[in-house]
Image (spheres, coloured by chain):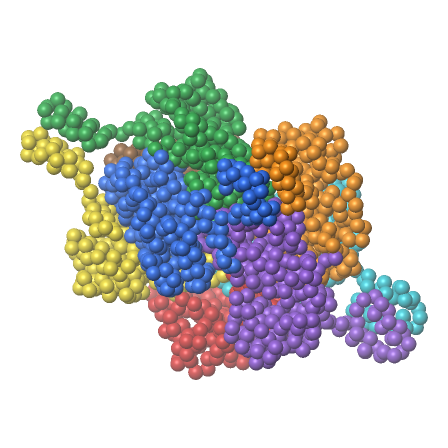
Chain colours: A orange, B green, C blue, D purple, E brown, F cyan, G yellow, H red
Amino acid sequence: MDTTQLLDLLHDYKQGNISDETMLQSLQDNQGFEDIGFAKIDHDRAKRQGFPEVIYCAGKTNEQIADIFAHLYQKSEQNIIASRATLENYQAVLAKVKDAKYDEFARIIYVNRDNMPIDDKRFILVMTAGTSDIPVAKEAGLTAQLMGNKVQYCFDVGVAGIHRLLSKKDLIDKANVIIVAAGMEGALASVVGGLANKPVIAVPTSVGYGASFHGLTALLSMLNSCAAGVAVMNIDNGFGAGRLASMINHMR
Amino acid sequence: MDTTQLLDLLHDYKQGNISDETMLQSLQDNQGFEDIGFAKIDHDRAKRQGFPEVIYCAGKTNEQIADIFAHLYQKSEQNIIASRATLENYQAVLAKVKDAKYDEFARIIYVNRDNMPIDDKRFILVMTAGTSDIPVAKEAGLTAQLMGNKVQYCFDVGVAGIHRLLSKKDLIDKANVIIVAAGMEGALASVVGGLANKPVIAVPTSVGYGASFHGLTALLSMLNSCAAGVAVMNIDNGFGAGRLASMINHMR
Amino acid sequence: MDTTQLLDLLHDYKQGNISDETMLQSLQDNQGFEDIGFAKIDHDRAKRQGFPEVIYCAGKTNEQIADIFAHLYQKSEQNIIASRATLENYQAVLAKVKDAKYDEFARIIYVNRDNMPIDDKRFILVMTAGTSDIPVAKEAGLTAQLMGNKVQYCFDVGVAGIHRLLSKKDLIDKANVIIVAAGMEGALASVVGGLANKPVIAVPTSVGYGASFHGLTALLSMLNSCAAGVAVMNIDNGFGAGRLASMINHMR
Amino acid sequence: MDTTQLLDLLHDYKQGNISDETMLQSLQDNQGFEDIGFAKIDHDRAKRQGFPEVIYCAGKTNEQIADIFAHLYQKSEQNIIASRATLENYQAVLAKVKDAKYDEFARIIYVNRDNMPIDDKRFILVMTAGTSDIPVAKEAGLTAQLMGNKVQYCFDVGVAGIHRLLSKKDLIDKANVIIVAAGMEGALASVVGGLANKPVIAVPTSVGYGASFHGLTALLSMLNSCAAGVAVMNIDNGFGAGRLASMINHMR
Amino acid sequence: MDTTQLLDLLHDYKQGNISDETMLQSLQDNQGFEDIGFAKIDHDRAKRQGFPEVIYCAGKTNEQIADIFAHLYQKSEQNIIASRATLENYQAVLAKVKDAKYDEFARIIYVNRDNMPIDDKRFILVMTAGTSDIPVAKEAGLTAQLMGNKVQYCFDVGVAGIHRLLSKKDLIDKANVIIVAAGMEGALASVVGGLANKPVIAVPTSVGYGASFHGLTALLSMLNSCAAGVAVMNIDNGFGAGRLASMINHMR
Amino acid sequence: MDTTQLLDLLHDYKQGNISDETMLQSLQDNQGFEDIGFAKIDHDRAKRQGFPEVIYCAGKTNEQIADIFAHLYQKSEQNIIASRATLENYQAVLAKVKDAKYDEFARIIYVNRDNMPIDDKRFILVMTAGTSDIPVAKEAGLTAQLMGNKVQYCFDVGVAGIHRLLSKKDLIDKANVIIVAAGMEGALASVVGGLANKPVIAVPTSVGYGASFHGLTALLSMLNSCAAGVAVMNIDNGFGAGRLASMINHMR
Amino acid sequence: MDTTQLLDLLHDYKQGNISDETMLQSLQDNQGFEDIGFAKIDHDRAKRQGFPEVIYCAGKTNEQIADIFAHLYQKSEQNIIASRATLENYQAVLAKVKDAKYDEFARIIYVNRDNMPIDDKRFILVMTAGTSDIPVAKEAGLTAQLMGNKVQYCFDVGVAGIHRLLSKKDLIDKANVIIVAAGMEGALASVVGGLANKPVIAVPTSVGYGASFHGLTALLSMLNSCAAGVAVMNIDNGFGAGRLASMINHMR
Amino acid sequence: MDTTQLLDLLHDYKQGNISDETMLQSLQDNQGFEDIGFAKIDHDRAKRQGFPEVIYCAGKTNEQIADIFAHLYQKSEQNIIASRATLENYQAVLAKVKDAKYDEFARIIYVNRDNMPIDDKRFILVMTAGTSDIPVAKEAGLTAQLMGNKVQYCFDVGVAGIHRLLSKKDLIDKANVIIVAAGMEGALASVVGGLANKPVIAVPTSVGYGASFHGLTALLSMLNSCAAGVAVMNIDNGFGAGRLASMINHMR
């Protein structure tokens, strides 16, 4: 409720159109979410953040996921996303929401209502250092697409063969926002960060072994990037990168 | 044996009612536990701490768990709790103790003798940041209930949608003690700690991925809470939180 | 503003006693804090949490500390605490608040207005494993005293000489809440936790060397205490322990 | 050299206006930086990234800093920034560049040529959890200002007193990009991330003690934020946050 | 070859009883081990260290283990030990060495030739904090027994019920060497170390969860024991503890 | 394209033999890799680094591995290596490349074209501390062999029986480069480093348990070797050690 | 009080020689330590552990150290040790105890009463890997000497020059117990452990830089020693090593 | 003593030219080092490893350093190096060895006897990512020079401005061995490793702040380099890199 709405409400109350009880309720209980016991579904989030609540599936039961998904589906007219989803999660959702799709690679259950305007000229470029980083890149890319962005991919351009990356300089120049997914030492983020005059979002991946410590090395490396202004996400957090890239890409 | 009891014993001895051997035995062997080889069952604990020894099942064999449970069941008139129990553990216990119940969600085997007075006005509030934190919350809640407390739950009120939490301000104000279970960055503990004028017990959960490091991040976050006076438990230690909350809730 | 106050306000507004602007202001700006630029002084905290905001001095300039202290002193009638304070900080405060005292050991600047009722029968026991842990214990103890609690100390009863601790069993039995400050391996918390049927608040200290890692070992040890229900604070956080102990000790 | 420039060069060469040697030189030596021995000054960066190279002073001698600063000053017409600078560094620079200013709080030496157009409507909001986080916030803010952005500050709105933050909801709604600097548990980033529908850049600070591990806890906490899309920088990296915020704020 | 043997050899050589080739061979090739390709079996170890080489099974194939075991069995007249062995490893060994036994609890394959004199008066006491620590204790105990020591066990005397431990003070007083196996916070080592005037060997176990970090907390705790002179082994290293205890117990 | 080639190209262009478009293409698109979508196959690497790109199988699908392998096989006349390969990966490759072999121990799929000259006098010595380290040693050795080197192995010469190692002093003296694979405390690298007057490449292995932390201890130990000039690789990185040893062994 | 003493006391009491009060006092207050407020001086320790309490100076004030030292000096007839002492600590002690000596190298204040019988044939060998490890070795050696042991030193025999160590094989063979102090990668402990058939006590030192992490690497390395039965102490804990070596060396 | 020398000795002994005592002495005492109490100076190392022992100054007293330096100076005819030396160390050395020089930047005391043949065609290239990494680079470079190598430097070519590095491709192609010193995220090692067909030795430096953790991030990053065959040294270990580079550069 913004100032104007609040003022209207007050005037209505003053004129006696609203009882004391209703007025108190309106002021105190203006919640914007739906309480279904094990979850408080945040229907207000689309208004507050420009996109509905996204379901994080890990640790939830199939029933919980399907229930939340169905509630979001009914209350919202926007796209729906459930991340870190298994095939089994999907089957539970599908039983309740026939429109639900599943991208096994990106591990995302979604409903794509095709009602979002997309600016073809401003695209998000999603790059990976290696072929093994592609799943994280796909999670980022699909998230961004479902949030109304054009996405381009550029895979396997890690710094061990820098000429592969340099040959894509043109793509880097044209992109509006860049996501870099890289495991091992994660150096790609620094090099791209040095080449680009636009926001670079670095996603460390858990690709690697030994002293990669499941992505910790790539994470630390990206946080210490000598290229100023590289933003860093949690390990394997493709979803978060896609979400942030979408917010930036929509700025005018 | 307190001072009065000891004095009585001494007088009895002085009057010759008690032999040297018995007297020595009484002074030295006043142990308060039962030795069954692989375990020393601490029957004295109920007197010392207000509740019988609780069985930590992980790493014990089915036979060991069932034996200890049966001994506690026979020697005590209070409720019995075995935490971190599997269904298989339960089946072994059930073969020996017909009254035993199992809560698969909280992973607790228990006997509830319904003989504990409960103060309805003072309740323990158990909150979670997300739906995935519920198992830990349930471990805490069931523990507290079996120890004679009224418990209320409030799930999925994490700080990413702060209005969900604020709408529960009333519940926070009425609670006597609050348990907060949260994974990821565990920020809920700080916000609740700032809102409440009562003890807040924070339980980091292993919910999350990547740099959550199986609950370490939530743990560190809660230890550094800017809200003074938040007590922290081990990761996923719902049992400990329930135990501490019960002790505090019983204070008069 | 609770429901009754809000209703009164609404009635006043309805009767035309309050203008639209004032009403909006009242509803939106019901802040409870004072904005002095570099700080938002939380005068509402005493109401919300039972004690005014406490100033954490580290990282603040002398001027900032003295200004905040002076504002709290004028607006509140309760005791004032500034923790982690240096002598230099104190001198800056003293120039503005003549009543301010300094405990160099506990590193606390305070004003003690002696207007807080103290229940002599319920005391907080502050124990240390060694002599070197005393500063942290004093920070905890002085905090609790300034918040209206009776405090008793018991120093140097670490587990390497368990008879020293056992000889204090009586004190443990009589205390209402116990704070244990210990460095090195921090084992005292577990032993006291096993002996006591009341809340034990464990404060790891940075006493030790080598693999004590500035208190990390004691912290981890206390979090894994085999005595159920031990609450853990941040390393060297005597203030937090005193604050929590005070909240528990005031429960009826 | 873009495609058009390269084609012009080729045509000139084909028409015999350019010798083989010159042509080879042009193709191979099109470097865009100046080599002064201990440093390769990257004059091309302004073109490539929209702002000249920034000098990171730590670990460089006064002479090195002053030389690099002077070279940048002569070759560029934009603002100059040297971060992590001491007063002593500044004095060395001042001897060579009379226009140089120093902000001791933000630890930045700079030249502000006042020739950058600033969009007054789009401002960057820089928030801190506490008063002790202000230096990092100032580093971020001054960086952004020198890069042509309007900046607003909002200090000491940490989550332990959530009403202080909520009273600033209006400012959050109006800002174009938000920087959050917080130490200890860093929870402010999550709460702001949940409230805002715009990019939030989180900067963990080294404020805290014990298990804050010099900012590591705040860093991990921010990386695991339950609010999707929060970008994280290195500990105390105000400069990087300002740089990224500027890039985002300039997007159209 | 000691000095006397070397002198004898030289004299033989001088008298022409030994050829140049043989003499060179004797001086250079006095190896003391058997090379079977994938392993160099150290037959000299029994002479050098008082007990034959022990086979560490993890990471070796069944064939490798059986071959090494068989070689040791043939060349040595002492007991044979293979630690960290699976049942499958045992079956492979049994096919080659009919005398081999397996203790599934201690995970040890062994041959016990019953030819080692045992001093009944000097025994090694193996204590555990909990029932879950018994496997590690058994690995230590069986190792010590096979090396010719009398062993006594005392399980489940952790510090959360200190009276259980104190009731065993007599056993502690009579033991010659003490091994303490404990997980979680490992505090038992410190308390026993304080009670005993004999060497205490602490073995951290991986028993616990969350911030026990698979035994790291117990390890750190034991290294920082406030009881001077506690020796620490690797996590779950019952074998090493048994080996060291045996060496100490055999000292005269 | 080196200077001579570039000059030739320019001359051709100047003489009109090459169109503007072709010339631009030649200058800009001189890539040296093949783009097959999910991978950019680096055919230029053999020229740049003396050996074709090696396929890291972990995290790639069978199809991806087989496709990249087949492309390398067709475009290169040198040996082909795919590391960290499973049997299943191999079967997919074999369906496309009949010449492919698989070493299950070293986890390498390879094509050995037997067209590489090998200098029999200069061999690489691969040593292991224990039998369990052999797989890593084999990965290193097979890699080096496929890159055209003679390899000798010396297993199970760890420092607990230093005479086993000293008996191999001759082999150490004759080797041209030495690879040391060791887990646990990794001390073999230091001892060999002290004995040898040639490059020693240390590969920590994940052999061990408890505080070996999956190879971290061996890694740290080798990095701190008191023998100067020991080069260290990632944990279990036999491939990298073989690659580096090959480069050094080929130096003239 | 052992059983005989207790029986005597009971008989005395029964015969009326002892009042109720005295009897209760005797049974409850048989403490064995002296309470001087900030410390409980453990006079019973000499009886319990064979040597009086040792003062750990770090974190204590000069006054506290001097007071405890003086109390121990008066109550005990054995040698007195205060470890981790500064010269300033010593001066405070000297003012109260004229016999006190100070070894600045070992950082120990001590009183040596020369009344301890020493077995010349059984000596403790203290070895170091480098010259920089000598201070820790001296702390260990002086501690052992003051506890009645003959000590021999052997410095700078690290494994990078293994022949230096092997030339001391004779000394290793003759020693009764061996202490090894080593920093960096700490490999000396493993090699000595493999050569010796007696207890080896490993003390990691903080000598080194970078990834030695102030002794952590040496500590981890020693815990993972492939030589079975090496006992490990905390980083730089020479005192503990000397204490343990003394206990072992006194065994008969 | 090699086989021939040993045979000669045996013959001399057989012919009675050598007494039993002398013979024993020769066989046992052929040590190759000089024992000066606090150090065993390894004069054999030049023969064994091609260069005399190098003195690591940290943790040694001025007297110790000067004594060892003087002994090496007298016994050897090669260059002498003392690393990690302070100016104060140098003054102590200079008092004993007039030829000693000091490079304050590289922190090395040395004697350069100018008697080492240097191959001008094969040079070692030492590169740094930034200006702040130069001291480590100098330690590496001076070490290599004193060991008889030609060295070239290339500073400040970090990956944030990749064109600076690419412009030095020619230098990379001509070098025989490359040392890369880099702090922060250390990505330069990977990029150079991908460009070069020769051994690359990576030295992480402690340059950086926050999550660079004093060089740990650069270390981990380099260990996980996606460019195969990069050798890694300890943090700031310029000396080790120079030593290894020298060994490789001298290979024929």
Where's residue E153, x and y in %?
A: 33, 33
Residue C182 as seen in the image, left or right of residue D189: left
- The residue located at (71%, 44%) in the rendering is A143
Above or below B137: residue F249: below
- The residue located at (31%, 31%) in the rendering is B48
- The residue located at (59%, 35%) in the rendering is A23
In front: G160, or F72? F72
Above or below A16: residue F146: below
Residue E188 as seen in the image, left or right of residue H189: left
Residue C164 in view here: yes
Q: Quadrant of residue G216?
A: bottom left
Q: Residue furthest right?
A: F16
Q: Residue furthest top?
A: B98
In front: D191, or G97? D191
Residue D4 as seen in the image, left or right of residue C130: right
Where's residue H169, x and y in %?
A: 71, 68
Where's residue G133, x and y in %?
A: 38, 62
In front: H149, or E9? H149
In front: H147, or G75? G75
Looking at the rendering, in which quadrant would you find the N terminus of chain B?
top left
